[in-house]
Each structure stands twice: as C-alpha cells, then as structure tokens.
Image (tube, grey):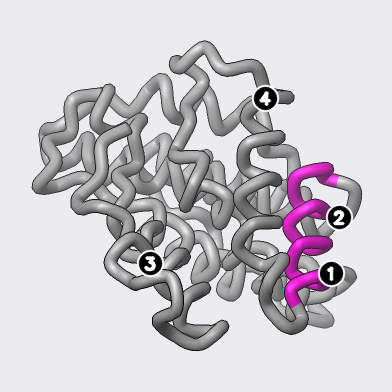
C-alpha cells in the first residue's frame, strides 16, 4: 500500500493529544494515502490524488447534485460522503485488483471506523452512518455511492486528457453502479466529451 508518509498518529506519544486531536491525527492519514487504482493504471505518484482528495470532491459533487433529488436528506448525504472512505485510514485503499473478498474488505474498514470513532464522544452516530453507507440500505447511501463512481469517472477523464491513462475501464466500472438519471446524465456527458443539457427549472 503506497503512502506519502508514515501514519501521523504514530508521531504522537501514547499520552499526547486530546480526544479530538488523536482522532484528527488518525484521519489525516487519508491525506497521505494514494488512491491505489490510479497508481496501478500508471499515474505517477507526483500526480496521484489521495483518498482525502477523492472524498472532498465526492462531497462537493454531492452538494452540487443533491438538489436534483429533493426527496433525499441533503445533510445526511453530505455526512455520508465525508465519511464514506474513513475506514481506509487503517485498512488502506483496497482495489478490486487486490484479490481481497468484499466481505473481508468491509470487515477491515469497519474495524478501522470503530477503532477511530469508538473512543470519540458522539462516535456511535458516526459509526452508524458509515455502516449505513456500507450496507447501502438507504436512498441517501446509494446516491453517495453513485456520486463516488461519478467522481472516479471525472478524475479518470482528467487523467486521460493529461495523457496519463486510458479512462475507458473506469467509465465502464462506474456504469455498473450508476442508475440515477441525473447522475447518468453527467456520466454520459463526460464520457462523450460534450456538456449535458441544462436541468429543467423547478416547477417548469
């Protein structure tokens, strides 16, 4: 698992830091963890995004597109987006090419989420939100999963336009998950290299 630096939490002594500070040092690992799939595809480390980069853009995309789905709880969508890859701080960015069964990947990530938030005041609710995303039991969780794949597609398109990779496999992978017509519209547009038609105004 390639990283930019050792885990920041290892820089703290056993008794150093507040409860918040120690959790923050653990979560900062997401800034140091490369998105491993890009490295495998040939993106050099200097140009490779981190898991934190991806999570931030996923949350931004959710914020921009959740208005297309007024039946969803927008606040929950944003919280799920921010939390969706937190388990990778300890589990690492396990890709489909690593040969790790899905159940084992989820077990490792769940163990990490519990380890991080289990000692934090209010952490029970954060763990439950992550579990909701992992189980894909709500419309909000499924929407965030689709936006996660959309962000992947846009980043693949950027890397392809920069001459670093062939984006086709990433678009195909995203299509396995995306069913929401609003998200599909954006994927189709970036795949075709043309802008989507404007969304109809509310009430039109």
- The secondary element bearing badge 1 is classed as loop
- Magenta extent: 123-136
For marks 3 and 1, give the CA distance: 29 Å
Which residue has dot 2 on it?
139
| CB-based contact (under 8 Å), mark 2 and mark 4 | no
Name which of mark 2 and mark 4 comes first in the sequence.
4
CA–CA distance in space, label 2 to label 3:
29 Å
Badge 1: how crowded within 10 Å, few (<14), some, or many (20+)?
A: some
Q: Is residue 184 left or right of residue 55?
A: right
> Residue 116 sits in which quadrant?
bottom right
Q: Position of residue 192 (x, y in %)?
A: 40, 36
Q: How many marks?
A: 4
Rendered-image quadrant of the N terminus: top left
Q: Give the dominant element type of the magenta stretch: helix, strand or loop.
A: helix
Report, in whole angstroms, how far the alpha carbon at label 4 lies from the one at label 1: 30 Å
Mark 3 sits on what residue?
Answer: 28
**Which sits in the foreground, 116 or 80?**
116
Q: Which residue is mark 1?
A: 72
């Amino acid at each position: 698992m390639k990283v930019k630096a050792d885990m920041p939490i290892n820089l703290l002594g056993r008794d150093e830091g507040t409860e918040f500070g120690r959790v923050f040092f653990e979560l900062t690992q997401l800034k140091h963890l490369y998105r491993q799939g890009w490295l495998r595809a040939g993106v050099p480390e200097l140009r490779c995004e981190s898991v934190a980069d991806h999570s931030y853009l996923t949350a931004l995309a959710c914020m921009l597109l959740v208005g297309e789905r007024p039946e969803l709880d927008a606040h929950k969508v944003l919280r799920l987006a921010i939390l969706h890859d937190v388990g990778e701080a300890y589990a690492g960015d396990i890709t489909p090419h690593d040969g790790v069964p899905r159940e084992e990947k989820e077990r490792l990530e769940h163990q990490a989420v519990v380890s991080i938030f289990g000692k934090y005041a209010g952490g029970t609710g954060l763990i439950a939100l992550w579990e909701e995303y992992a189980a894909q039991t709500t419309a909000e969780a499924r929407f965030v999963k689709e936006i996660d794949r959309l962000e992947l597609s846009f980043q693949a398109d950027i890397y392809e336009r920069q001459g670093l990779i062939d984006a086709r496999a990433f678009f195909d992978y995203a299509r396995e998950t995306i069913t929401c017509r609003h998200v599909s519209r954006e994927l189709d547009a970036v795949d075709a290299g043309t802008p989507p038609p404007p969304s109809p105004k509310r009430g039109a």
